[in-house]
Image (spheres, rainbow, N blue to C red):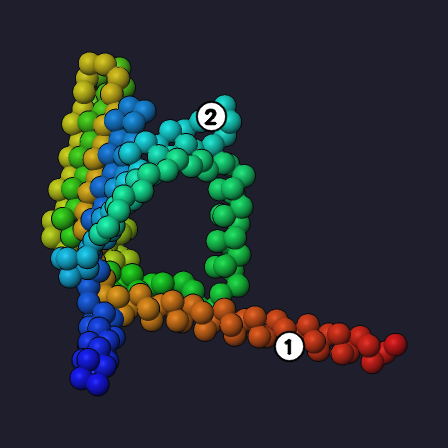
Amino acid sequence: MLIVYSILILLLLLFIAIPLSTLHITFLFTHQGDDDFLRLKITLWKVISYTLELPEIKVNLAEKKLDLKEKSKGATKEKKKRKSITLHAFLNSYHNYRNLLRHVGGFYRILKVFFKKVTITDVKWNSRFGLGDAASTAVASGLVWALKGNVLGLLSHFVRLKGIPTIGVVPVYQGTLTQTRLSCMISFKIGHAIVVMLQVLKHWRSISSNANKKSKKYVAGGTSHV
């Protein structure tokens, strides 16, 4: 009986602690020529972690698809697999996403409130590039500086951007070169994410219920005139 009570108390503590805990996501993206790399490391309590890596991201223009090599690593095992994302699948996902935004009432408001509780720190965004021409590279360098500043400024309106971002643009006046490295830490309370999911689910059920009522009303009205 003591063991049962101990397990119940432990589960209760976890039930209370998890929503109040902060989830940290370490984001890293690098681009060099035709090679792209993406890594997301999710950490909870500095003990539990899950890492997702895309060490190879290749654009296949001939077949209109994106070839990915994926590697994930949890606490116990590591998985590797390859997959492709076709243009048709991407467009289909995009249309489904647009339909979700169109039909889920208050989705933008819910998302905006959640983003305001998301904190982004340790932003580092450095780039090196050359266009093969000194004059063009110099002009493009100023444009890239402005673009980065605008992106970070826009981002600060949606999330809590803490600390001073480290950004750099190094023009290479001889040769053609493109290199970018972007990293940051994204943090939010698990409880806030749970609230957002529940709110979206509530709106979705409400819309589905209203759609079903309208459909039944239409059928009933149609049959009454037969």
Question: Which residue occupies the foreground of this view, 205 or 70?
Answer: 70
Position of 5 relative to 166 (above/below): below
Q: Which residue is mark 2?
A: 61
Give the left or right position of residue 93, taking residue 161 as reference.
right
The x and y percentages for residue 149 are: 22, 43
Mark 1 nearby-residue class (10 Å; few <14, some 14–19, many ≥20): few
Give the left or right position of residue 108, taking residue 120 as reference.
right
| Point 39% across, 71% down: residue | 198
For the residue marked with disc 2, what is the amino acid? Answer: Leu
Figure quadrant of residue 167? top left
Position of 22 relative to 133 (above/below): below
Q: Which residue, as the protein is rendered here, is positioned at the far front?
A: 1
Give the position of the C terminus as an image quadrant. bottom right
**N-terminal of the two: label 2 or label 1?**
2
Give the position of the N terminus as an image quadrant. bottom left
Mark 2 nearby-residue class (10 Å; few <14, some 14–19, many ≥20): few
Residue at disc 1, secondary structure: helix
The x and y percentages for residue 78 are: 27, 43
| Point 17% across, 35% down: residue | 126
For the residue marked with disc 1, what is the amino acid? Answer: Lys
The x and y percentages for residue 113 are: 31, 67
Q: Which residue, as the protein is rendered here, is positioned at the far right?
A: 226
The x and y percentages for residue 66 are: 43, 33
Residue 120, visible in the rendered structure? no
CA–CA distance in space, label 2 to label 1: 47 Å
Position of 72 relative to 161 (above/below): above
Give the left or right position of residue 215, taking residue 204 as reference.
right
Q: Which residue is mark 1?
A: 213
Residue 210, visible in the rendered structure? yes
Residue at disc 2, secondary structure: loop
Question: Which residue occupies the foreground of this view, 147 or 61?
Answer: 61
